[in-house]
Image: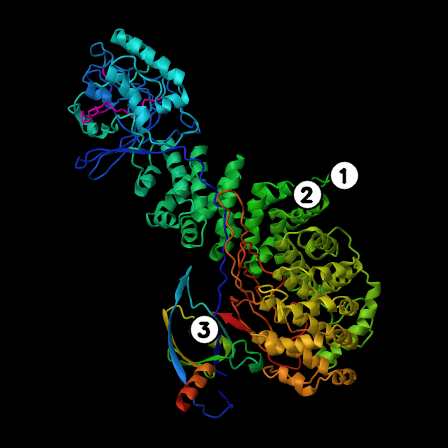
Amino acid sequence: MPLELGREQSPGSQASLATMPEAPDVLEETVTVEEDPGTPTSHVSVVTSEDGTTRRTETKVTKTVKTVTTRTVRQVPLGPDGLPLLDGGPPLGPFADGALDRHFLLRGGGPVATLSRAYLTSGGSFPEGPEPRDGPSYGSLSRGLGMRPPRAGPLGPGPGDGCFTLPGHREAFPVGPEPGPPGGRSLPERFQAEPYGLEDDTRSLAADDEGGPELEPDYGTATRRRPECGRGLHTRAYEDAADDGGELLDERPAFSAVTAPLAQPERGSLGSLDRLVRRSPSVDSARKEPRWRDPELPEVLAMLQHPVDPVKANAAAYLQHLCFENEGVKRRVRQLRGLPLLVALLDHPRAEVRRRACGALRNLSYGRDADNKAAIRDCGGVPALVRLLRAARDNEVRELVTGTLWNLSSYEPLKMAIIDHGLQTLTHEVIVPHSGWEREPNEDSKPRDAEWTTVFKNTSGCLRNVSSDGAEARRRLRECEGLVDALLHALQSAVGRKDTDNKSVENCVCIMRNLSYHVHKEVPGADRYQEAEPGPLGSAVGSQRRRRDDASCFGGKKAKGKKDVEMDRNFDTLDLPKRTEAARGFELLYQPEVVRLYLSLLTESRNFNTLEAAAGALQNLSAGNWMWATYIRATVRKERGLPVLVELLQSETDKVVRAVAIALRNLSLDRRNKDLIGSYAMAELVRNVRNAQSPPRPGARLEEDTVVAVLNTIHEIVSDSLDNARSLLQARGVPALVALVASSQSVREAKAASHVLQTVWSYKELRGTLQKDGWTKARFQSAATTAKGPKGAPSPGGFDDSTLPLVDKSLEGEKTGSREVIPMDALGPDGYSTVDRRERRPRGTCSAGEASEKEPLKLDPSRKAPPPGPSRPTVRLVDAVGDAKPQPVDSWV
Amino acid sequence: MSYIPGQPVTAVVQRVEIHKLRQGENLILGFSIGGGIDQDPSQNPFSEDKTDKVNGWDMTMVTHDQARKRLTKRSEEVVRLLVTRQSLQKAVQQSMLS
């Protein structure tokens, strides 16, 4: 047979929406003043004083000189002639976290210097500002205090080395960087991001304008912050200025800038700086427009490598702000190779830098575009993040790290990397502690409750995504010590507190569901529990049901049914194997005790994803040929879970109906269940079919996958059960089915429905009734024209699982900036789409060539990891009946 | 297209050229394939399109694995397929009739 191609494939697109935190208020802002174009370059200078109070950087620009003023300025360097030198720096904003101590020390503090243009242009002599601290410190631009040039003569010792330029005299007005609040003003924690220009400048300017203590303390910054300081300062400065210049020096007062021309460029090497100094915007205090240019992205990225740490931190924070909800910027950052810089900062010695870098990475990692995620991986981002998580005690950092990991985890190639580097850490540092689970429970204390923290939510989201990555991922998670235990504990705690709608619970249940997938094949020692080969009926196999290869015994699917009946009888007295010690770790996944938990979630939760996942977990657990599945199916019945599921069939949400239908289908592998479901669920199932065929309101129609799932469930329960087939007739299912076949747009639905009809027709006992109602074989068959299956033959047992082609792609759930988490599920490649005897519909499944991966892609932002069970045959009891060929495979190429 | 095993078949074909995408270190095509002579034809997931050739390799008598390998060769960035489709067949027939 020639190779057949699937028409399309939806690769598992994972969207993991990670959280994108809202950029914090941009506290830092860089302001640049543009100088006349045509001036040459600027150079980058960094000045730091010992306490890191001053910062300045200048970025090089080809044509214009831009100076960025920083808000704080501590010292005023004095030029050789005693005039303070102005230098502009980027106002990276107050490194608000105080990483740097930006306080202006007005008194005794560092010299405050703002070299304002005013200062420079005023031409006056300056008082010298406080002596320059060791090293170059300059006040300039800053919001530092404006220095008022003392009227006195040139001050004493000029600035030591590292003087800074003199502001050029270009400006007509002295416009220094806004003079910072008068001494003592510490940089405000919250930097109001607004143009620095005016108020600040005027502050300094005013001084020089009047040359007197006219510094209005109403300059923006000053006023904002410490008006009184300013005033005081000014006054002081003034007074000081009035004094002998020497005093200024001694006291290092802050002084307002005055218009005084600073020394000229011939200040040696600093000469070139003066051009930079031009920063002060013109002083028109009435003008409120920003005069500072925002730094360009390359500049911001360059600042990430600035020697001054607060610059780095601020640059990262600003970057985070720029990237927020801006895919173009995110892309550019990657293109400009900004991501390795940020990842490198995750190991920086300063906490603030690490925190900001992580915040920026979080935003950058969020989004549909997977390239950033890949780039972060390529520069070692995952191990770096995990290291940071281990080291960090600060909760905000932990939230950021885990949020970033959540974002990254939606990208499929990264999932295994996250498991490799991060699984142990995430489990032991976050999941176990926050779940309340104790490894060695203290007898005396009551069990702790889970803490639903953001960190836990992010981590559980990340693990949810990675758990969808296939068999190996599942194995690793199952075997991670304490993980399953902790998750179960957390879920039980949630149920106990009736808090089951939150996102963390949803994530945990999804992980449990994913890990329950294929337990019967994948857990160590599973084969011990496999049902033995069928022996003589009624043989003392104890409570083991035999579902295996019926063909070998009886040669047909039907046989399975027969055998089941016999074996099922043994199940009424189901005895669970005695356990010598409590189950631990992955064993907990399939202990019958979980049934109660899932049923509680199904009863209480209103979160559709949680409902779907809980039903999915039951579906997964009920599948399989092993003993635990048998117990679970019986336990569900005993815990009165069937009515719970049936009621959920009324849900208006597609995914819930679908998951529940398939769960019921698997559960009906248990004979008693099948009888009960046939009686109690038939009406609801038929109602869903009817709704599919004629929706009660436009737009209320169920999706194809859901309809097919319901049909398959009906098929399962009417197969090999005359009573159930009768129930179907009584529920007026036949007209609905025939109508569906006739009217459905979907080939799969029509086929599934006709399959059911054929099965019904195969009951000779019912023919009379059917014919009385006017049905003829022809009518039934015509409905099945496209069906390729055997006509009129007893339908093969319930293997038909053309379930869920998982295709919806969900968006990555990333947390939004507003901290709303959009769940993200990673979608994994979907193994077989369905093992439908008749036809398989790849529909968007992307099988990774692996057996049954099932990752449903859901459209809504909450994507879940694999939907309940593999889309494939949960009910895969036996391979094709009577068919020697192996199960059909499809591969994703 | 009716197909009788062992008999020559005439079919309308379409040439399709696909450039593989890069996903991580792999080159992928982005769709699923099913079937193969080792598979049960009645369970073929995709029955509408059939591939006759891939980059010159014959696909009419290959197993599923062989087919997959031929499509996923790392060295080839472009895959040229010769595909037959039922809908093509019908379309051609209809156009011939009209």
Residue reaching furthest to the bottom: B7
**Image spot of residue A14 (x, y percent):** 50, 57
**Mark 3 to mark 1 CA distance (whole Å):** 59 Å
Asked which secondary structure carries label 3, the reply is helix
Magenta region: A158-180
Q: Quadrant of residue A520?
A: bottom right
**Image spot of residue A481 (x, y percent):** 63, 49
Q: In the drawing, what numbered circle is on residue A439?
A: 2
Asked if residue A382 lies left or right of residue A714, the reply is left
Q: Verify whether residue A414 appears in magenta.
A: no
**Image spot of residue A645 (x, y percent):** 72, 60
Which residue is identified by label 3?
A: B69
Instruction: Please say if the residues under marks 3 and 1 sit with CB atoms less than 8 Å apart.
Output: no
Q: Quadrant of residue A393?
A: top right
Q: Label 3: chain?
A: B
Q: Is residue A599 above or below residue A194?
A: below
**Looking at the image, which is closer to me, A401 or A211?**
A211
Amino acid identity at mark 1? Glu
Amino acid identity at mark 3? Lys
**Mark 2 to mark 1 CA distance (whole Å):** 12 Å
